[in-house]
Amino acid sequence: MKLTETDVLVIGSGAAGFYAAIRAAESGMRITLWEKGLAGRSGGTVSGAGPSAYGSFSDPDDSADSLFRDTVEGGSYLSDQPLVRILADEARLRIQELEDWGIRFDKNSDGSYLIYTAGGHSYPRVMAISDRVGLQMSKVLRTKLHTFENVTFGEDTLATKILVNDGQVSGAVGVDFRNGETVCMQAPSVILATGGVGQLYPVTSNPIQVTGDGMAIAYEAGANLINMEQVQFFPCGIVYPPSLQGFILGIQEYAKLYNSKNERFMEKYEPEKLELTTRDRLARGIHSEITAGRGTEHGGVWLDAMDLDPEIYKSFLHEIEVSAERGYDYRKQRLEIAPSVHYFMGGVEIDTDTSTSLPGLFAAGECSGGLQGGNRLSGNALSELLVFGSRAGAAAVKHAKEATNSTCGDQGQAEEDRIIKALNRPKSEITPNEGKKLLRTIMAEYMGVTRTGKGLQKAAKELRKLKEILPTVYVQGSSLQFNQSLQSYLELEKMVTISQTMVAAATIRKESRGAHYREDYPEWDRSIAPQCTLACTEGQKPVIKTRPVKMTEMTPEQSA
C-alpha cells in the first residue's frame, strides 16, 4: 500500500470537483484530486445544457427571489431553503468568474446574452453556448486548475473508503488502477464530488462512471443521506435506435409530444403548461401513455421538433449533430423518446458550507442532497456545481487549517486486505457485470417513474439476495493494474448499498411528491409539513427516518 498525505482531497472531477479544487488551491495548501477515469472527462458535467441564474444579463422583470421561488415550488417544497437562497444569490458571481477565466456564452446580435426559458422557470434565465455549455465549462475549469502548482492529479483512482478517527475524517483509501496499487491518503478534509446514480438503471443519460460511489462511502463512514427516493427521469431520452438509447434531448422545451394515436397528450395532463411543465410531471405523462398502450413501436412516444425557428436550433447544435450522424435529424422527422434516468436530487446531506454530518467530510454537486428537493429545474444543476463547488473548497481549507493531524491507522490496511481478497476467490458463473445487470433490472422494475408499496418490498428482498451473493462474484485477474473486472465489482458493492437506501427511503415516503410517485399514495397532503427522508447509521445499524424540511422563507400554504 502506498501511504501519502495531502491537506484537501477532492474526489471527482466534474465542474463541482474542479471548482472545489480551484478554490482550495488558492489557499496555497496541498490539494489532491482523485478521479476514477480521466479528469474532466468522466463526469456528467460535459452534457450540461446551460446554467440558470439571475444577474445583469437577466430579463428586467426577473429577480433572485423569483429564481428562489421557482426552485422551491419546482422541488415540491422538499428543498432546504437556505441552500436555495445561496444558489439564487451566488450563481451570477460564479458565472462572472467563469467569464473572467475564459468562458464565452452565446450573445444576440445586439450584444445581449442569449437566454432561454426552461420548464418550471418563470422567466428566460438559462444561458447557452452553441457547443455545449457543460463541455466548455469543464475545459475552462481544467485549464484554470492546471495553473496551480500545488495540485496533484490521481487519475484512474477509485475511492473505496472514507477513513474516520476520533469521530472525524482522516483520509481515504483508493485503488490506483493505473499504477496497480492501493493508496492510503491521509487528509483532514475530503470533498466528495462524484455525481449521481444513473448507472443503477438500464437506460440513463449518465456516463458509465456514475455509479453512486461517493454517496456509498459517505454513508458507510457515518454521514447522512437525504431524499434518496428522488430520482429524476429526463422526459425525453431517445429509445430508438439502440445507438442513441438514453441520449437526452434538450429541445423538449420547444417540442410537441404525441402518442401513437397522434394525440398531443400533455393537453390532458398539464393543459396550461403542456410540455413546459416540470420534468417530473412530463415524465409521468409520457410514462402513463406508454403503460396505457398508447406508446410507439419501440416503447416510447413521438417528439416533434420540426419546423422551429432556426435561432432555436443554434442552442442545440451538439444534440442535432449526434442524432443526425446516426441518421435521425429531428429538424426533419419525429423521434421516439421515453423517460431516461438523468439526475438525482438525493445525496449526502449538507449544510450551507457543504459540510456533512461527519466532520471533515464535504460534498458538492449531484452527490450532495437537500438543494433540489423533489425535482431539479433545468439549468439549476450547472449553477449548483459552480456555487457549491466553490463553497466546498473554501470550507475544506478552513477545516484543514484547524484540524488535528490525520492518520490512516489500521483502517487502511484492512481495506487493502479486503480488496486483495476479492482477487483470490474461486471461479464462479456470477460476474460483476451480470450483478450490475441484475441490479438494474430490479431498480427499473420497482424504483422507476412510478412505485408501489408491494413493489418496493419485492425490491428490498431482491437487493438483500443480491448483497448476499456479492462474496461469490468472480473477479478476473490477479493484478490491480487496469483491472476492469475488479473496478466493476467494487462499483457493484457500492451500487447495492445505495440502491438499498433508495428503496428504504421510497418505502417510508408514503406520498407522491416531486419525482417520487407512489401509485398507492398518489397525492401529498399540503396540511402536513413537508419532511425529508434520511438514511443514516445508528450503532452501526442502518436507519431510515425523517426530519422537517428547512423552510426559512416559503411554505406550501403561501403558494396555494
Image (cartoon, rainbow, N blue to C red):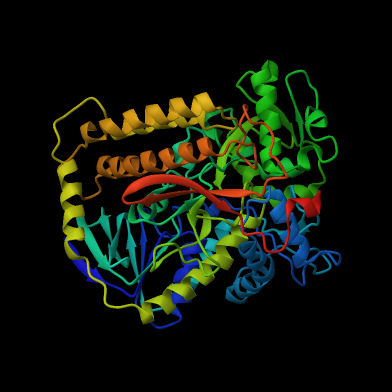
Q: Is residue 393 left or right of residue 238?
A: left
Residue 131 visible in the displayed image: no
Q: In which quarter of the view is residue 264 placed?
A: top right
Residue 205 x %, y %:
54, 41
* Residue at the (81%, 28%) spot, across then down: 268
Q: Please, is residue 305 above or below residue 155 in the view?
A: above
Q: Nearer the viewer, residue 500 or 537?
A: 537
Q: Is residue 490 above or below residue 364?
A: above
The one nearer the camera, 7 or 533, is 533
Residue 76: x and y, percent?
Answer: 68, 47
The residue lying at 57 percent from left, 66 percent from top is 386
Q: Could one spot residue 520 in this view of the protein?
A: yes
* 440 with respect to 71 (left or right): left
Q: Is residue 143 left or right of residue 426?
A: right
Determine whether 203 is above or below 290 in the image.
below
The answer to which quarter of the image holds residue 476 is top left
The spot of residue 356 in percent (x, y) is 45, 63
Which x, y percent locates residue 396?
Answer: 43, 73
Tell me the quadrant of the picture where the N terminus can be found: bottom left
Q: Count of labels shown?
A: 0
